[in-house]
Image: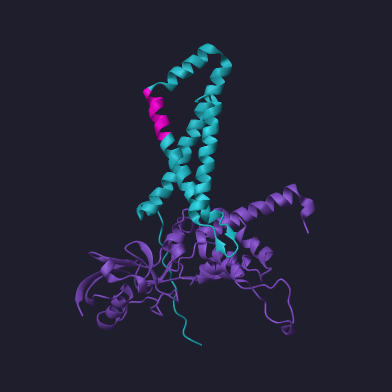
Amino acid sequence: MSERAVELEVLRYNPETDREPHFQRYSVSCREEWVVLDALNHIKETVDPTLSYRWSCHMAVCGSCGMMINGEPRLACKSFLREYRGVIRVEPLAHFPIQRDLVTVIDDFMDKLARVKPYLIPKHEKPLAEGEYRQTPAELKKFKQYSMCINCMLCYAACPEYGLIPKYIGPAAIALAHRYNQDSRDGGRDARQEEIAATEGVWECSFVGACSEVCPEHVDPAGAIQQVKIKSTVDWYKEHLMPWLKK
Amino acid sequence: MAEEVSRRPYVREMGWRWIFRHPRYVRYMLREFSCLFIGGYTLIMVWGLKQLAEGPAAWQAFLEWLRSPASIVFHAVALGFALYHSITWFNLTPKAMPLQLGEDFVADGLISGAHFAGWAAVSLAVLYFAGAF
């Protein structure tokens, strides 16, 4: 198996000793087929055990190893070393505070995710004896792509609106709210609208579209956000111009 | 209970360099800046209406100004920005208004294509009423 010499420049930050982050360069010999995460694991095992970063599955399912690789939000487990020329610069995900080295503070995202109620809220509770909630393939297809989200937060690191306006609920949370709103079994749209149809919801989005471009699972959060904008606008007109329609 | 770990998260300032982090952000900013040129074009139209209301001499002076090199350059740039904005916007329409017929979604090209066709039809109608044909 062929080897390649790789130089990685990793942003380091130790909250106990550093006033601000700094880059540290590592020169290591890596296997041709390795991804950036393999290189980081190799550094941690053989060169510098203090290097901190998150990872778990190594197969683009868990969404833990999101980081900036040469300035672009990527999953380290899905970024092959052979895709890069020269020094590979690795930084923590943009727009999130740095906890330590490549580990970010994700409390803000977790809080926003909970606020949009990303779970089924059945239209009517029915007893088990009545059987399952059934769905046609067409009804499934309506929301399926949004259910592929792995909460890796690459879309937040790509979104300049989130970087500039941290109160913005952001792409993944809105896409997941939309996923449940689109589900024929769900009746929770009104509860979610309070969060996502607000100023800090979809209306902070100016359709940069970067969220959809960087998504490793090919979810289209930008599309979800625009669809929520249209539906919320229709809601507004119905409420203000046709109040008699209100239930 | 585990020992308390000190948390002193480091917040990075965003600054303005993000615009050049990837070409997509430059393209986005160009689309945003197109409003300045389209706004400018609208103001020129309003100014033209005012000159028209003031009489033939004022209107003639306005037409003279329209033929000046500065005006031609501005209109060429504004047309470029208007085309850029319209084309990129219509290309995004399938994201905002996906159409599901039966099980499948209508192809993106059909949705944006319908918008382009509508744009062409309206432009032709405007040219027709302006006496271009």
Q: Position of residue A83 (x, y in %)?
A: 28, 66
Q: Is residue A207 visible?
A: no
Please identify the quarter of the rendering in which residue A68 is found. Answer: bottom left
Viewer-closest of A92 and A230: A230
Please identify the quarter of the rendering in which residue A139 is found. Answer: bottom right
Point out the residue furthest to the top here.
B57
Q: Identify which residue is drawn at 61% across, 73% down.
A: A119
Magenta stretch: includes residue B11: no
Q: Position of residue B26 (x, y in %)?
A: 38, 49
Chain A: drawing colour: purple
Left/right of residue B16 with respect to residue A85 in the rendered view: right
Q: Identify which residue is drawn at 61% across, 53% down.
A: A230
Relative to A238, is A78 above or below? Answer: below
How many marks overall?
0
Q: Which residues are magenta?
A: B69-78
Relative to B29, is B78 above or below? Answer: above
Q: Which chain is cyan in the rendering?
A: B
Q: Is residue A71 visible?
A: yes
Q: Identify which residue is drawn at 64% across, 51% down.
A: A233
Please tell me whether the stretch drawn in magenta is mainly helix, strand or loop: helix
Point out the residue furthest to the right here.
A244
Viewer-closest of A53 and A60: A60
Viewer-closest of A34 and A203: A34
Q: Position of residue A242 (x, y in %)?
A: 76, 49
